[in-house]
Image (cartoon, rainbow, N blue to C red):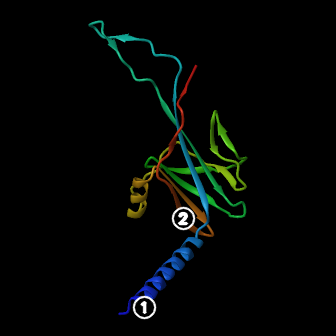
């Protein structure tokens, strides 16, 4: 086969691939999912405890991790967040109130000023059972620290964040 014909066929194949990819991408809405975590440590140092030999028993501080999850989308889209997986644990989303951007927590800007509708995702504290999930969803939640399941135009979609951004820890008073 002549090299020019070969090149034309290759370009044609790339064009078809690019066109199909753009059609697939046009099928789902453009969303931005933001995930943050912050470790909080109580300010009071636990009282020292000693064993029977007089050695200090070290106790770990009661640290807790708080998660801040935000979804930004065009205001005209009717996105309905349903479930969220945080570090592999599945939760039911209770509410997703619309908030003003920018979103600032302390010295950190979590979501920059945007014309998109920003929702703060809130979920119940009891993890849901994950045994009935499909293999594809299990694989997705294993590969990403944050996975959002949402509905748009009657279909179920997923949005992922590979790594949740860690914010500076907070120490209590």
Q: Give percent across and percent down for residue 45.
A: 48, 16
* Quarter where residue 104 is shown: top right
Rounded to the nearest angstrom, the CA distance separating label 1 from label 2 is 41 Å
Secondary structure of the residue carrying tag 2 is strand
Considering depth in this image, is 122 or 128 the residue closer to the camera?
Answer: 122
Vertical order, 75 against 70 (above or below): below
Q: Which residue is mark 2?
A: 157
Q: Can you name the residue that lies furthest to the left here? A: 53
Q: Give percent across and percent down for residue 81.
A: 60, 57
Q: Residue at x 38, y 92 (%)?
A: 2
* Residue 142 horizontal side relative to residue 155, left or right: left
* Residue 137 horizontal side relative to residue 111, left or right: left
Which dot marks residue 5? Answer: 1
Q: Give percent across and percent down for residue 53.
A: 26, 7
Tell me if residue 132 can be seen: no
Q: Can you name the residue that lies furthest to the top here? A: 54
- Report the number of numbered marks: 2
* Quarter where residue 55 is shown: top left
Q: Residue at x 66, y 51 (%)?
A: 119
* Residue 151 horizontal side relative to residue 16, left or right: right
Location of the N terminus by quadrant is bottom left
Vertical order, 163 against 7 (above or below): above
Tell me if residue 105 can be seen: yes
Vertical order, 28 against 91 (above or below): below
> Callout 2 environment at 10 Å: few (<14), some (14 to 19), or many (20+)?
some
Q: Residue at x 43, y 60 (%)?
A: 137
């Amino acid at each position: 086969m002549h090299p020019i014909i070969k090149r034309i066929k290759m370009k044609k194949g790339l064009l078809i691939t690019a066109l199909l990819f753009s059609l697939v991408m046009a099928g789902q809405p453009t969303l931005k999912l933001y995930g943050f975590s912050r470790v909080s440590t109580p300010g009071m140092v636990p009282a020292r405890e000693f064993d029977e030999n007089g050695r200090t028993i070290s106790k770990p501080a009661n640290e807790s991790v708080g998660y801040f999850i935000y979804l930004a989308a065009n205001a005209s889209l009717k996105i309905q967040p349903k479930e969220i997986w945080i570090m592999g644990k599945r939760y039911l989303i209770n509410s997703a109130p619309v908030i003003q951007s920018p979103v600032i927590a302390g010295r950190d800007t979590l979501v920059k000023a945007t014309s998109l509708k920003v929702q703060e995702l809130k979920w119940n504290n009891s993890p849901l059972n994950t045994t009935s999930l499909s293999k594809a969803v299990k694989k997705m939640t294993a590969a990403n620290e944050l996975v959002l399941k949402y509905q748009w135009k009657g279909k179920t979609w997923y949005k992922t964040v590979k790594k949740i951004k860690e914010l500076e820890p907070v120490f209590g008073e």
